[in-house]
Amino acid sequence: MAYSDKVIDHYENPRNVGSFEDKDDAHIGTGMVGAPACGDVMKLQLKVGDDGVIEDAKFKTYGCGSAIASSSLVTEWVKGKTLDQASELKNTEIAEELALPPVKIHCSILAEDAIKAAIADYKKKNA
Amino acid sequence: MNYFELFSLTPSYQLDLSDLAGRYRTLQSQFHPDKFAGESAQAQAIAMQRAAQINDAYQTLKTPLNRAQYLLSLQGIELAGEQQTVSDVEFLMLQMELREQLESLQAAADPEDAIDKLAARLNKDRRSLSDDFESAYNEGHYQQAGDIVRKLKFYARLEQQLQQAEEQLLDF
């Protein structure tokens, strides 16, 4: 299958790979999601400042090029956004930016759900 | 007519594979194109369609995961091609760990031994999930059975990747 240039760029030079050391830190929200359709697993972490703005994001994804590119892209996108802004992120924007073919749409859904799960985890910690 | 009925079987997760293979061969020979060579174009087309259906049915029923998924589809639960994500944190953490193990196989002191150990682990987990599926399905807990099928799909992927890793390592 032919990957778009943007997918290849993110796949070959993924941004923000890794995880934050102290996952119990109240500033860190961790989201874990998986896609049964392809067996992909994604962990995405947000580091949120006291002002509610996302300062940093990291991810670890086991999956195909599109799944890695989707998670790499969203970690870039959410930096500098408020939690509310980040939660409005739609998988269609990811799919459009990366020019994902229909069979790879679930990779962008995975990335959207990972962000939502990380935000939910952060809110739960700080409730 | 569902795939089980096609082979004159009642829907069940437990299946005798050699019995299924025997039924498959019998049916395939009944609808073999050669038998319809002298018949009308319409009869030939019907026989061909039937042969294709028999083949699809066999491919679906012979693999436990596909069989499980098919059994649930008969109960109105469609898991094939679904784009839904799962968020069972404990299960996903375990999947991450297993993926990490898979990734580190090449660096292991004894890769073959590491492969065997991981293969045994995956096999054990898959069997246990398979048993869980059977109980949930037999008790009519179809949603729960569906969640187990979703988990089994992660294992199918892992086993496929382990096999690829093994092939790569043996090339050295």
Image (cartoon, rainbow, N blue to C red):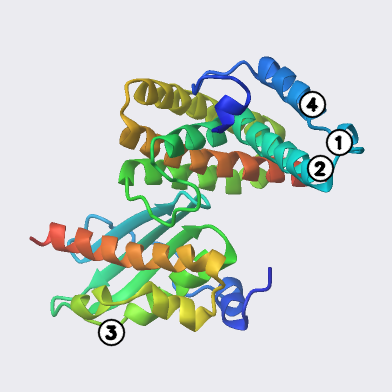
Mark 4 or 2: the one toward you? 2
Chain letter behind tag 2 = B
x then y, percent, for residue B90: 33, 41
Side (left or right) of B130 relative to B117: left
Mark 4 belongs to which amino acid?
Answer: Gln
x then y, percent, for residue B48: 77, 42
Give the Cα separation between the discs numbered 1 and 3. 70 Å
N-terminal of the two: label 1 or label 2? Answer: 1
Label 1 with label 2: CB-CB less than 8 Å: yes
x then y, percent, for residue A126: 11, 62
Mark 3 belongs to which amino acid?
Answer: Gly
**Number of the label disc, if any, that sits on residue A80:** 3
- Secondary element at image label 4: helix
Mark 1 belongs to which amino acid?
Answer: Phe
Which residue in the protein does label 4 denote?
B30
N-terminal of the two: label 4 or label 2? Answer: 4
Report which quarter residue A73 is drawn in.
Answer: bottom left
Q: Residue at x 68, y 46 (%)?
A: B106
Q: How many marks?
A: 4
Which residue in the protein does label 2 denote?
B44
- Secondary element at image label 1: helix
- Secondary element at image label 2: helix
Chain letter behind tag 4 = B
Give the Cα separation between the discs numbered 1 and 4. 10 Å
Which residue in the protein does label 1 denote?
B36
- Res. B120 in view: no
Give the Cα separation between the discs numbered 3 and 2. 66 Å
Chain letter behind tag 1 = B
Q: Is residue A121 above or below residue A2?
A: above
Give the Cα separation between the discs numbered 4 and 2. 12 Å
